[in-house]
Image: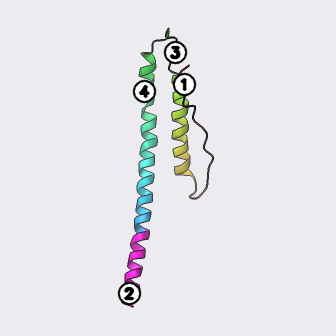
Amino acid sequence: MRRYRLISVFLLLGITTAAADQGSEREQLARLAHELETLQPLIDAAQAQADYPARIRFQYPWLRQDLDKVRQGILEHLNAPQGEPRQIRPLAGDYRR
């Protein structure tokens, strides 16, 4: 009987730890989404300093689009019902023209 109680305690601790880990992950993802949003002023500042006569230019609009896709993907995950798969859109990944 004591053995079954011990097993029950370990199972309960495992379930509680898994739920705590999931909550912690959600907090970190929410923080990450917020941090991605705070990058916009840095991108604006970098674009304002850009050398536009340059032959090869960094494509700030493409960077903004990709960061927004990542942020939206995180927010969709946080707001979606658990266990629902979603499609991932590819990033451009090339910021030079």
Disc 3 to disc 2, how far (Cα)? 70 Å
Residue ID at (50%, 8%) = 53
Q: Tell me if mark 2 has few (under 14), some (14-19) or many (20+) residues whose alpha carbon lies within 10 angstroms of its own.
A: few
Question: Foreground mark, 2 or 1?
Answer: 2
Residue ID at (41%, 86%) = 4
Q: Quadrant of residue 18?
A: bottom left
Q: Is tag 3's residue or tag 1's residue first in the polypeptide sequence?
A: 3
Q: Which residue type carries mark 4?
A: Pro
Q: Tell me if mark 3 has few (under 14), some (14-19) or many (20+) residues whose alpha carbon lies within 10 angstroms of its own.
A: few
Identify the residue position indicated by label 4 in the image. Answer: 41
Q: Which residue type carries mark 1?
A: Pro
Q: Is tag 2's residue or tag 1's residue first in the polypeptide sequence?
A: 2
Segment colored magenta: 1-15
Q: Quadrant of the C terminus?
A: top right
- Give percent across and percent down for residue 8: 41, 80
- Give percent across and percent down for residue 3: 38, 87
Q: Is tag 2's residue or tag 4's residue first in the polypeptide sequence?
A: 2
Identify the residue position indicated by label 3 in the image. Answer: 56
Q: Tell me if mark 4 has few (under 14), some (14-19) or many (20+) residues whose alpha carbon lies within 10 angstroms of its own.
A: few
Disc 4 to disc 1, how far (Cα)? 13 Å
Disc 2 to disc 4, how far (Cα)? 59 Å
Q: Are marks 2 and 1 in contact (CB under 8 Å)?
A: no
Q: Is residue 31 above or below residue 64?
A: below
Q: Which residue type carries mark 2?
A: Arg
Secondary structure beneath label 3: loop
Q: Which residue type carries mark 3?
A: Ile
Q: Is residue 75 above or below residue 81?
A: above
Indicate which disc residue 3 carries: 2
Indicate which disc residue 61 carries: 1
